[in-house]
Amino acid sequence: MADNKTESTLSSDATEVRAQKLKLLREQIGDVYPAHFHRTMTNAELGAKYESLEPDVETQDVVTVAGRVYSSRNSGMFMDIHDASGKIQIFSHKDVTGEEARALLPMIDIGDIIGVTGVVRRTKRGELTINAQKIEMLTKSLLPMPEKWHGLSDIELRYRKRHLDIMTNEDSKLRFQQRSKIVSGIRRFMENDGFMEVETPMLQSIYGGATAEPFKTHHNTLKLDMYLRIAPELFLKRTLVSGLTDKVFEINRNFRNEGVSTRHNPEFTMMECYWAYADYEDMMDLVERLFESLALAIHGTTEFPFGDKTMSFKGPFKRVPMPDAVRQATGIDFLAIKTDEEARAAAKAAGFAVEKDWTWGECLAFIFEEKVEATLIQPSHVTHFPKDISPFAKEVPGEPRLVERFETYCNAWELGNAFSELNDPEEQRRRMVEQLEQAHARGEKEKQLDEEFLDAIDQGMPPAGGLGIGVDRLIMLLTNAPSIRDVILFPARRSKAD
């Protein structure tokens, strides 16, 4: 093994030092990256088992642990090693540690992964510690770690090198552990509520279910252009037609070839579900119960911090029809306005710049976005959307210009979108043809009518409520994350050359 003389001959460059140590280790111990190593417990399990061990007490228990070296003091006499569950202190001294293990200490750098076998004790200062009897090199790290206590200060570098971000940033590590808990919590909630999880195609020959620009690819064998899905809606509805289940859901990855922002990533996660013999009010209740359960799972309470605000996921949430919200904010009563021309004139008189061909519903929705969205800080359901912008929802009885649709807002963000689903096959075809014509007019020449979906609806789909929830935004709220890139493990980013 290396001695002090050998170590003194190493390069002064940190990366080169590690490369030279690796070479020495290969010569002296052989395999520096062994395939087999078995620990007896994790660091967290060790801490739990010996939680009541008194200071300055040594057990006779021999354990084997493993982890990455995060700190080294007194020439390796004291080291802290971390596994995914936490840290443990390692003590190496000639009174307790064999010569072979001590000879390895000069070759160990911060960031190396080692295995340690030894006796458990608690120091006089109360630190749970292993008196190392045996130390094994499991992985030699060839690159220095970022400074532990400051981590990565460059935000873009944190996203590009997420492994280092998590390695040196406890908040980031916790956030992704919470993300996993939230996603599994959604799944458990839906299953406990009687929903059946299915998987629908990500590669689709016809894209649909939402209005968005798709990512396009090509299947060589089939000689077929295909698209990454923008939504699973049309396939999930076919499941309801089939009678496989009355309550279906999917936690799905969707892809939209659009902008990137603090709330938008081209690849994102949604939970979409459909519930036969239910309507949009049932879906509102479901959202409230789901959100409340997730807040309790993460925070132990329905109230939690986000930035300088305190959010409350305790239901029931505020419910307000869109025309009422706009009238309260601007004084414009859209329900009293009869024509598109009158709607545009009223909007312009109030100082809003609207397009010359906008419909009554488009004017209403635009003013809502401009004047109301930013005020929706606590969870709120905005109901009764214009039919002009909601082609797949059923009309509100007595008001054919509005539909039974709601969007759930919090922190001025849209978190969910739900309908009393349209299941009249003739009306469904009429609206989809109209939507297709509008898409072609916008230049989306590749968009096609999904005849297979329409054929399924002709077979008969039961009345149903449908819901989509933006999982990433929901996780942002629950984990106090300012950007969607903080909650996506490997977010979309520009190439390094850019």
Image (cartoon, grey):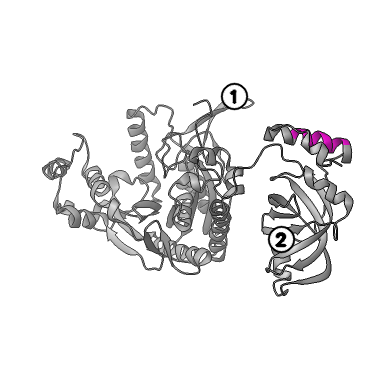
Q: Is residue 257 left or right of residue 72?
A: left
- Image coordinates of residue 85 in percent, x first then y, are 67, 58
Instruction: Tell me if residue 226 is in the magenta stretch.
Output: no
Q: Which residues are magenta?
A: 19-27
Q: Is residue 346 visible?
A: yes
Q: Earlier in the sequence, mark 2 or mark 1?
A: 2
Q: On screen, 272 above or below 379?
A: above
Q: Is residue 352 left or right of residue 70?
A: left
Q: Would you say the residues marked 2 and 1 are in contact, meaning their CB atoms lie under 8 Å apart? A: no
Can you identify the residue that label 1 sits on?
223
Front residue of 447/132: it is 132
Q: Place residue 200 in its image quadrant.
A: top right
Q: What amino acid type should be assigned to the residue bearing mark 1?
A: Lys
Instruction: Please give the label number shown on residue 43.
Output: 2
How far apart are the two marked residues, 2 and 1, measured between alpha carbons? 53 Å
- Residue sitting at 87 percent across and 35 percent down? 27
Instruction: Tell me if residue 23 is in the magenta stretch.
Output: yes
- Image coordinates of residue 101 in percent, x first then y, are 85, 51
Front residue of 254/145: it is 145
SS for callout 2: helix
- Residue sitting at 14 percent across and 42 percent down? 351
Q: Is residue 18 left or right of residue 301?
A: right
What secondary structure prevails in the magenta region? helix
- Residue sitting at 19 percent across and 55 percent down? 329
- Image coordinates of residue 41 in percent, x first then y, are 77, 61
Q: Is residue 420 visible?
A: no
Q: Place residue 65 in its image quadrant.
A: bottom right
Front residue of 158/312: it is 158
- Label 1 CA crowd tier, 10 Å (few <14, some 14–19, many 20+): few
Q: What amino acid type should be assigned to the residue bearing mark 2?
A: Asn
